[in-house]
Amino acid sequence: MFHTERYDGSREEQYDLVIRQLQALLEGEPDRIANLSNASALLNQFLDRINWVGFYLHRDGELVLGPFQGLPACVRIQLNRGVCGKAAGERQTVLVPNVHEFPGHIACDAASQSEIVVPIVKNGELLGVLDIDSPELERFDETDRNGLERFVDELLRHL
């Protein structure tokens, strides 16, 4: 059903392809956890130079660990705390070139050097966040922000 794809072309074209893959992978599947699991696996094989990718789900006023790829992670994060909490609380993508310079950063994996977090909001309701860490400083840029926000938009059609 699915095979590893070679991502050629510009980075924008690569994001276009992974978003089309996500759409095909999730089409017709109503289960939220299954869809988040496949989305994290897809991003894990698509993105290079990362050490963690996954979701935190908004439950009872905090973020709770959801499907992910990587080392074990923090289970609960308060809103407005750390990079994930800030993205969730402000409902805006947060791109951090150097996590050691981010006030209140929560270090679940000491190897992480940079991070991007995209909020997942549907009909005004915060569902959670997509969190991606890298062991490399300044790993993420505006192309990643735009591509990952588009990825989350497609994901939202299946949640």
Image (cartoon, rainbow, N blue to C red):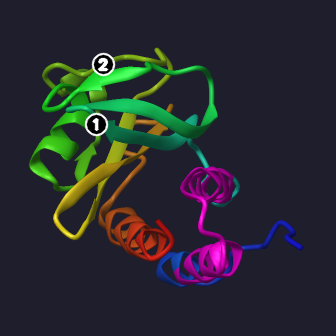
The residues bearing labels 1 and 2 have C-alpha atoms spaced at a distance of: 9 Å
x and y percentages locating residue 46 in the rendered image: 65, 61
Start and end of the magenta stretch? Answer: 16-44
Residue 11 versus residue 99 in the image, above or below: below
**In this orientation, which residue lies closer to the viewer: 14 or 119?**
119
Q: Is residue 40 magenta?
A: yes
Q: Quadrant location of residue 31?
A: bottom right
Rendered-image quadrant of the N terminus: bottom right
Q: Quadrant location of residue 10?
A: bottom right
x and y percentages locating residue 116 in the rendered image: 34, 47
> Of the numbered discs in the image, which one, if any, rests on residue 106?
2
How many marks on residues? 2
The residue indicated by pointer 1 is: 84
Residue type marked 1: Cys
Q: Is residue 66 left or right of residue 126?
A: right
Q: Is residue 105 magenta?
A: no
Q: Dot 2: what SS?
A: loop
First reached walking from the N terminus: tag 1 or tag 2? 1
Q: Is residue 30 left or right of residue 75?
A: right
